[in-house]
Image (spheres, rainbow, N blue to C red):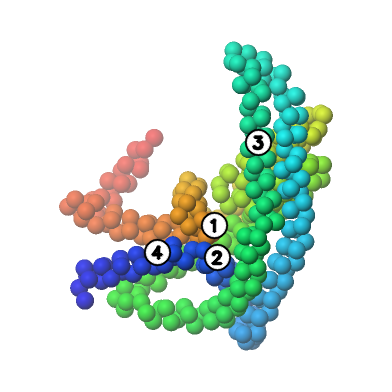
Amino acid sequence: MTKRERQVFWLLFLAVFLTLVYVLRDVLLPFVAGMAVAYLLDPVVDRLERFKVSRTLGTSIVVLAFFLVTIGLVLLLVPLLQTQVEQFAKSVPTYVEMIRERVGPKLQEMLSGFDEESAVNKLPNIAGNAMAWIGNIFGKLLSGGAWLANFLSILVITPIVSFYLLRDWDRMVETIDGWLPREQAPTIREQMRAIDRTLAAFVRGQGTVCLVLGVFYAIGLSLAGLDFGLVIGLFSGLVSFVPFVGSTLGAILSVGLAVAQFDSWQPVAIVAAIFVAGQLIEGNFLTPNLVGDAVGLHPVWIIFALLAGGALFGFLGVLLAVPVAAVIGVLTRFALEHYLASPLHLHGIPPADDAMKRIEYDDHKP
């Protein structure tokens, strides 16, 4: 088989694979979740194997413990979250009206040159209707049949998929390694190790960061006396895997509710300080220690990947967006390294001369 034929084969394989993912996107969610759980828990089972625990027994213990804890937390939090979301949807117009009454006079002074009706009255009404609509959507998702069907499929199918994948993980890796083209196998293994490091740093590290931030914001806002602090705090933390989005939305929403709820500015300042403290903890402690520089994903690239994944594959695309972006990032860096060392980039200049020119350029940079 010639090089061109191999390229055509792999391009066709990739096209068929992407087509199948797109066609089956509505049924893949529990399987993707099972793969994510297996990938997440594989180091724990490997550690149990070092203590002479069989792979099957170790997998059973780890998967059972993981899903018992997860289901317990879901059963504990979902009723409370559903109640708070529904109450939030009903209370948003009231809070918006209170904000308008308190902030309206200042807006009138700032926007004195504009039409008062459109600048002061219409904007809060539009915001109130939009927030009420969003709240109702979340309430329906939590109480509707579609959410229940998805939850049941994840609850039943995901543990089974996770168990079998986790039990046979090493065997599957060995089998897939045997399928690799022998000539390119070392290069593919090297890139797969780089992809594994990137995914591990993001999934395990960033997942822990989101969980810690969610608990911190939920407890902090609840202790500050903010209505719906539990929902807003958990939402802000769990959405923190999107750079700046979770904390920004949470801060805006929390401060806005605090302005409407409290009569003085001191509680509002406390709510704002909670998010400032959360960002300081995340930037100076959590992310450097739990994620580090191994991810190598620019925030703009993550946001684009999430939007593109959601537009193409829905919720499944959102789940796969960051891992796929990490894989593309690793492969892009690999391709860029080869391009920079190729005649296509050097244009006949020897690599040594190009390296010297780079050093001279770096020395003269301002």
Other residues around mark 2 within 10 Å, as few (<14) / some (14–19) / many (≥20): many
Specify whether residue 213 is in view. no
257, 58: nearer the viewer: 257
Q: Position of residue 342 (x, y in %)?
A: 24, 57
Among numbered discs 3 and 2, the one appearing first in the sequence: 2
- How far apart are the two marked residues, 4 and 2, measured between alpha carbons? 15 Å
Q: Which residue is mark 1?
A: 315
Quadrant hosting residue 80: bottom right
Amino acid type at mark 4? Leu
**Image quadrant where one finds the C terminus:** top left
- How far apart are the two marked residues, 1 and 4, measured between alpha carbons? 16 Å
Going 66% across and 76% down the picture, which residue do you hit? 62
Left or right, 255 with respect to 323, comes to: right
Amino acid type at mark 3? Asn
- Provide the secondary structure element on which disc 1 rests: helix
Other residues around mark 4 within 10 Å, as few (<14) / some (14–19) / many (≥20): few
Left or right, 347 with respect to 29, comes to: left
Q: Which residue is mark 4?
A: 18
- How far apart are the two marked residues, 1 and 3, measured between alpha carbons? 25 Å
Residues at circles 3 and 4 in contact by the CB criterion of under 8 Å: no
Furthest-top residue in this view:
113
Q: Position of residue 237 (x, y in %)?
A: 66, 50
- How far apart are the two marked residues, 2 and 1, measured between alpha carbons? 8 Å
Residues at circles 2 and 1 in contact by the CB criterion of under 8 Å: yes
Label annotation for residue 129? 3
Q: Which residue is mark 2?
A: 29
Amino acid type at mark 1? Phe
Going 75% across and 24% down the picture, which residue do you hit? 101
- Provide the secondary structure element on which disc 2 rests: helix
Residues at circles 4 and 2 in contact by the CB criterion of under 8 Å: no
